[in-house]
Amino acid sequence: MDHRAMIKKVYDNLRPGGWFESQDFSFDMVAADAATEAMLPDSAIKHWQQLMFEGMKTMGRDLRVARHYGQW
């Protein structure tokens, strides 16, 4: 799916005053505090996350695509 093209089509077809709402998730892990953030880079779960990103990329999917929606 070309998310950028879909968002462009939506906005190109909105009437003045119209709005578009999208819901998606971000697969990026974040920490609740600085101590936990310091542990994330070397953690097994961060390694698993990276493998998920790489595996899905080989299938043509970007698990981080939602972070671009605002700028698109």
Image: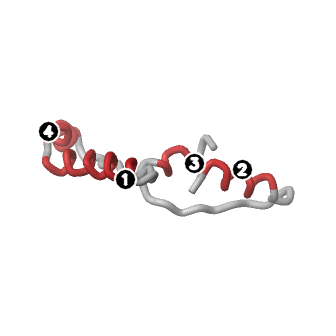
The kind of residue tagged 1 is Met
**Does the rendering let one see residue 31?**
no
The answer to whether marks 2 and 3 mark residues whose Cβ atoms lie closer than 8 Å is no
Residue at 37 percent across and 53 percent down: it is 56
Give the alpha-carbon distance from disc 3 to disc 1, as whole Å. Answer: 19 Å
Q: Which residue in the rendered view is the most extreme toward the right?
A: 16
Coordinates of residue 33 in the picture (x, y in percent):
23, 44
Q: Earlier in the sequence, mark 3 or mark 4?
A: 4
Tell me the distance, in whole angstroms, between the alpha carbons under discs 3 and 4. 29 Å
Mark 3 vs 1, N-terminal side: 1
Q: Classify residue 9 by image quadrant.
A: bottom right
Foreground mark, 3 or 1, reads 1
Q: Can residue 42 be spotted in the picture?
A: yes
| Callout 2 amino acid | Lys
> Callout 1: helix, strand or loop?
helix
Check residue 69 in the rendering and tell me which mark sits there, or answer none. Answer: 3
Q: CA distance from mark 1 to mark 2?
A: 24 Å
Secondary structure under tag 3 reads loop
Residue carrying label 4: 42
**Left or right of 31, for residue 67:** right
* Residue on which disc 2 sits: 8
Q: Earlier in the sequence, mark 1 or mark 2?
A: 2
Depth check, mark 2 against mark 3: the one in front is: 2
